[in-house]
Image: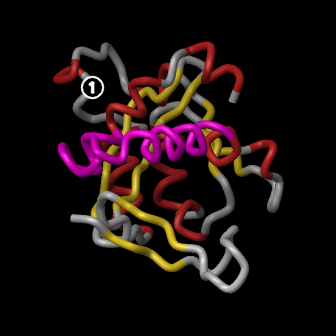
Amino acid sequence: MLLLVRRSFGYALTGNRPVQVLSYDTRSERVFAVCAFSVFGFEDWRFVTGTYNTERFNEACDDVVLDNGALQRGMLRPLVRKFPIVVLDNAAIHKSAEFEDMVNEEGGIVIFTPPYCWDTAPLDSGAFGWVRRYLQANQELCATIGLERALSRAFRAVTPSMARSF
C-alpha cells in the first residue's frame, strides 16, 4: 500500500504543498507500550492496542514492574526488587494509589518527575526518540512483521551504553 500524506508544514517548491510518501499506513493502528527502562536498556514491556486508562495501566504494570510471571521468563525476581525506584512522569493515569500500593508492597518506591521537566524523563527525551527514528528508518519492517514486533526489535536494539546516554 502506498499512501500520500499531505502535511501542514514542511518544505516544498513555491506554490506546492509538502507531500510525504509513506509505504505503510501510520494512522491505522494505535499501540501504547508500558516499559521498564534501566541503565541496561529496556528490561521488559507490554503493549496495549487502543489507549491506556488507569485500570489498563495498572494491569500492564502489574505484569511488567511487579512481574508476577518472572520465573516463567527466566528472571529470579520481579523487576521492582531488582530496581526498587520506579520513576514516572506526571500523567494522570500514573497517579493511582493502587499502583503505588502495589509497588510499596514489593519493597519499591514511586517517584514522580517534576512537571514539564523533559530532561528528567529518559524515555521521553532519549529512548523513545531513538525508537521512533529506528521505526522510521525501517518502515518496511513495520509493514512486514507488524508494529508490535517491530517495536520489540527496536527495544531490544537499545544497548546498555545507549541507555546510559539517555
Which is nearer the eye, 117 or 142? 142
Name the residue: 40% across, 48% down: 61
Can you tell which quarter of the image residue 7 is in?
bottom right
Q: Position of residue 111 (x, y in %)?
A: 69, 45
Q: Residue furthest front?
A: 14
User: Dot 1, crowdedness within 10 Å: few (<14), some or many (≥20)?
Assistant: some
Report whether 7 appears left or right of 141: right
Q: Residue furthest bottom?
A: 15
Residue 127: in magenta span:
yes
Q: Which residues are magenta?
A: 126-151
Report whether 62 appears left or right of 99: left
* Majority SS type along the magenta span: helix
Residue 47: in magenta span:
no
Q: Position of residue 106 (x, y in %)?
A: 46, 34
Name the residue: 59% across, 74% down: 18
Amino acid type, residue under disc 1 in the picture: Ala
Report whether 62 appears left or right of 149: right
Can you tell which quarter of the image residue 126 is in?
top right
Q: Position of residue 81 (x, y in %)?
A: 48, 24
Q: Is residue 6 above or below residue 40?
A: below
Q: Is residue 148 above or below residue 5?
A: above
Q: Position of residue 138 (x, y in %)?
A: 38, 40
Name the residue: 33% across, 31% down: 153
Which is nearer the eye, 137 or 74? 137
Q: Which residue is mark 1?
A: 70
The quadrant of the picture occupied by the C terminus is top right
The quadrant of the picture occupied by the N terminus is bottom left
